[in-house]
Amino acid sequence: MATTHNYDVVIVGAGPAGMCAGMYAGRSMLKTVVLERGFPGGELLNTELIEDYPGFETILGHELAQKFADHAAKFGAEFQNGVVVECVQKRADGTFETRTESGDVYLSKTVIVTAGGTPIKLGVPGEIEYAGKGVSYCAICDGAFFRGHTIAVIGGGDAATEEADFLTRYAEKVYLIHRRGELRASKILQQRLFANPKVELIWNKTVDAVEGDTQGLVRNLKLRDVNTNETSELAATGMFVFVGFRPNTGIIDGHVEHDDMGYLLTDANMHTSIRGLFAAGDVRAQLTRQVTTAVGDATTAAIAAEKYLKALADGDPSEPIIGSGGYTV
């Protein structure tokens, strides 16, 4: 049965940003809930090894996720399973209504959106048909199914480069297909990849189609050279796509300022153009998207939300004055 809940802060998404925001909001003695469709962790759960989070030379992604969740819970943040379908500021006093797929409603004066993004698909014939049958968007989730196989990784950024290297633990051969003549990944990841004898780079090509066998599994990729327009085929039993993420901002009802890619614009306090709505992590427009930047955003957002709530309680009549709608605290 649908239920209405009251909180000071509702946090949408339990990735690194959401869990860090939950920790700081709870530490500020705010009644806080973190809503997440699955297990807390976000992209940490799709990353085997973390090597660039201060204090841990190496740590498994799921272990770091558990530490984040435990820390947030220690300070009183509640974790609730729920697929958020709408977040709207409906009431005259500025209260938000955050609704989940089950019909539950979470009322709060502040919301911190840390919903991350969804993997971008190639949009080519066969991709959807063979999803889960050779087409994947998560190396750590599905890599073990391709032991001894020949597979292809699509992309040229950090994620594609890192996951191609990771997949050589299982696959006999990994092709990295990139539409340009050089990778965008960090130099250290490139060096590691180039030194891996199981990896072969295919430059300046894109995937035109995914083809399957009589059992309905991937067997072949059709490629196109971006310079010559010539086509070719690559025998592969798996395709892992890492060409970027699309921010999960569709839950926000009402206009909120964003960039051309849909990432939310904020001021220095992580305040969006909607009063009382904050954003942190991968959903926000910024130079880079790392665990460290996510938790930095979240720290600021949670503290700013606490100050915002205090200003409301004190009857502060101030209005947002920063271009992107930020509240001066």
Image (tube, rainbow, N blue to C red):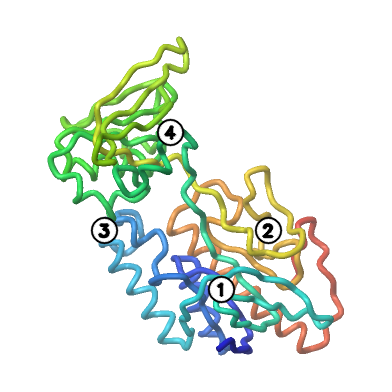
Q: Check disc 2 and report its element: helix, strand or loop.
A: loop
Label 3 or label 1, whichever comes before in sequence order: 3
Label 2 or label 4, whichever comes before in sequence order: 4
Q: Check disc 1 and report its element: helix, strand or loop.
A: loop
Instruction: Identify which amino acid the numbered label 2 is placed on.
Output: Thr
Total residue callouts: 4
- Estimate the x, y position of residue 53 in percent, counting from the top left: 36, 59
Q: Going 83% across and 63% down the picture, which residue do you hit?
A: 321
Query: Of tags 3 and 1, which is closer to the observer?
Result: 1
Q: Going 79% across and 89% down the picture, which residue do you hit?
A: 314
Q: Which residue is mark 3?
A: 57
- Do labels 3 and 1 touch, CB within 8 Å? no
- Estimate the x, y position of residue 9 in percent, counting from the top left: 61, 80
Instruction: Identify which amino acid the numbered label 3 is placed on.
Output: Glu
Instruction: Identify which amino acid the numbered label 1 is placed on.
Output: Glu
Q: Which residue is mark 4?
A: 184
Label 4 or label 1, whichever comes before in sequence order: 1
| Mark 2 vs mark 4, CA separation in Å | 26 Å
Residue 30 seen in the current view: no
- The residue most toward the right is 317
Label 1 neighbour load within 10 Å: few <14, some 14-19, many 20+: few
